[in-house]
Structure formats: C-alpha cells, structure tokens
Amino acid sequence: MNINFTNKQYETLLEVAYLGEWIANAGRIGDQQIEKYNELLQYIGTFAKEFNQSHSIEYDQFLGGYFPTTEYEEQMHPIIKEYDELNFWERLSDRLTKRDIEQSGKTFTSRKEYFELYAEIRKKYEIEFSVNGVRNLVIKEYG
C-alpha cells in the first residue's frame, strides 16, 4: 500500500510524529522509552529530503538516526510549552478537587451527585489559578 502526501501534508505529519514522540518519551530514558513512537519518527524522517524538509530533520551518522534540527526544535517547543502549561493547571485542579472530595468524607448516592460536587469545586480552583496562578498556594509543613 502506498500513501501519497503533499509537501505540506508531510510537514504536518512530521510535526504530529515529533510532538507525539516527545509526549511519549521526553521523560523516559533508555529501556523505558516507548520504542514504537521513535521507530515511526525515524521512518518518517527518512523522507525528509524528498519532501523538502531537510531543514527540519536530518540524519546524524554518529548517532545513526534521524533527528530534528535545532531550529526545528525551537519552532516546535512553544507548542510543547503551551501543552505543558495547560496540562499542569488541569492536573493540579483535578488532584486538588479529588483531594477535597476525599477529605470531605461525603458519601454519594449517585455518580451525578459526585460529578456535580466535582464540577463545583473544580470551577473554584480554575478561577483561582486563572487569576492568581500559584501565588496563593501554601504548603503546610508536617513534623
């Protein structure tokens, strides 16, 4: 089977592959990496020259693989930074909301009741963080 791409479609495919591989493997080292994502990015990289993307990804003989150029990484990292920022606030709000519900000791008669309280508490955190960021967060010392 063959799949044909325009240069623009290949450029987008490369971006998606790069971002996906980054999300999957950025925090992993060695054997912890999910190899199938790197393998796909490597395969896609073999076509970079053919699709006029040598400025984005190039073969490194010393490392034996295709790697993004420095300027390509600089171009892509604002997208990663935006994702990380959003993900941070989402996860923080989610964890604090779940903590508050757990600490309340409240029992629920239905999932609907749980999610109504969840939405109410979560909204408060979202507003607080959108206005103040971490300015008002306090970590209690336990001793």
Image: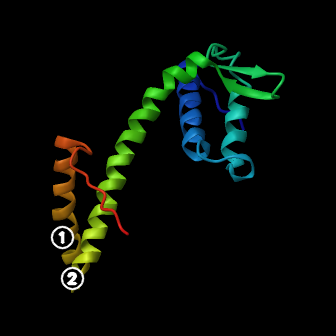
- Residue 121 in picture, x, y percent from top left: 18, 63
Q: Quadrant of residue 61?
A: top right
Q: CA distance from mark 2 to mark 1?
A: 10 Å
- Residue 88 in picture, x, y percent from top left: 37, 47
Taking 135 as reference, is 13 left or right?
A: right
The residue at which mark 2 appears reads as 106
Residue for point 37% across, 40% down: 85
Q: Nearer the viewer, residue 54 or 89?
A: 89
Front position among marks 2 and 1: 2
- Judge whether 121 appears above or below 58 on screen: below
Q: Quadrant of residue 104?
A: bottom left
- Residue 82 in picture, x, y percent from top left: 38, 34
| Helix, strand or loop at mark 2 | loop
Figure quadrant of the C terminus: bottom left
The residue at which mark 1 appears reads as 117
Q: Residues within 10 Å of mark 1 (few under 14, many from 20)?
A: some
Q: Quadrant of residue 73?
A: top right
Q: Nearer the viewer, residue 91 or 8?
A: 91
